[in-house]
Amino acid sequence: MSRRTRRSGASGRGGAGPSARRLALDVLVRIDTGGAYANVALPAALAESRLAERDRAFATELVYGVTRRRRALDWAIDPFLVTPPPPPARAALRIGAYQLIELDTPAYAAVSATVAAAPRSHRGLVNAVLRRVAEAGPRDWPDDATRLSYPDWIVETLIADLGRDTALESLESMNAPARVQRRADGYVQDLSSQMVVDAIDVQPGDLVADVCAAPGGKATALAARGARVVACDSHRGRIGLLEANRAALDAEKMLLLAADARHPPLQPGCCDAVLVDAPCSGLGSLRRRPDARWRVEPSAVSRLADLQRELLEAAVGLLRPGGELVYSVCTLTAAETLEVAAAASADERLEVLQPSVEPWLAHGDGAMLLPDAGHDGMALFRWCRR
């Protein structure tokens, strides 16, 4: 029995009714054809459904699992197709193949239940193809990108930047579901993000600017330590997220500011610390956003690295002498970590601070956490203003 079978329980063996599969099918079609985000479309669909908790969990497993494993599933399905199927049939085929290949669901249960959930006009096709998939036996994957179900460019980039073994282990890890991590105040935040806040030397009363703050996890944690926090974000719509979290966590010392962090409207030299938790390609946190691997373009890495350098350059000017600059990104690319940090370290106004200790791994002038079962991948760099 596979890990995924044990995790899915009876649902993985076909115990959930077709309504869970039908909901998953509808959400997957929205993701593939309408550009919907899994972490938005699925909760909305579940909120409108009357599914039992067991079926809700199974629908979640199907939507997130199928979205992650899309490339591998299509590789197993496509040899038995004459022409590309319409989106609802493709979604049903992926759901069935996911149960057969990833959940070890008995063929009779996976096929019959998926056929029942498919649109009536596509049931014959779904039945015939899934039976062939079930009969195909063990898969001999053509390459690592197909086996792990990522775009070629992500696999190639991380192998070049991290080395083959580390890259493949990290990619494998990000195919597993994310664990829910709660802080002591109840806020849900990945352990890596919590560890970034722990690494910042902040004392009660210090003025801290979190210049890319939404949705506010790190900013509220800093406020809880007694800091006076200016939480900035350039997207006015995301300021609402900051406001909601400030109210929910009683972060009264948090000031919200809609501003472009490349041109912060703050007095130069006013901050004891500045956190630049920068926009990035997110290639260390793909377990949380199952569709992100298919949305991120290769050009995003260099484009975001340029933005990250601009954000750090502006942040230096906000620091008082002796103030601390912290740069974090939830990605693993060298361009967004080592190269961006090297540019900051070359700034004569800054002195590199010692990298964080275990479980952080040395990474150039800073440190890195590789994604594993407990947390996302994260890079962290720290400097002091001379």
Image (tube, helix red, strand yellow):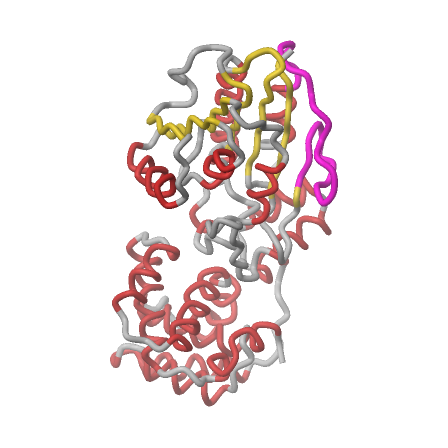
Residue 84, given in percent of the width and then of the height, sits at: 36, 66
Instruction: List x then y, in percent, for residue 67.
Output: 44, 61
Quadrant housing the C terminus: top right
Please tell me which residue lies in front, 207 or 291: 207
**What residue appears at the point 63 percent right and 44 percent down from the top-left corner?**
158
Q: Using the rendered image of the protein, determine whether residue 121 is visible from the camera's viewpoint.
A: yes
Q: Which is nearer the eye, 224 or 2? A: 224
Q: Does residue 299 appear in this view?
A: no
**How many numbered marks appear?**
0
Quadrant hosting residue 341: top right
Tell me what residue is drawn at x 69 percent, y 35 percent.
Answer: 367
Viewport quadrant of the N terminus: bottom right
Q: Is residue 231 above or below residue 241?
A: above
Residue closer to the observer: 36 or 200: 200
Q: Quadrant of residue 118?
A: bottom left
Residue 350 on the magenta segment: yes
Q: At which x and y percent is residue 28?
A: 35, 64
Compared with 340, 280 (above or below) is below
Identity of the residue furthest to the bottom in this view: 108
- Frontmost residue, 256 versus 10: 256
- Residue visible at 56% across and 59% down? 175
Residue range (magenta): 345-368
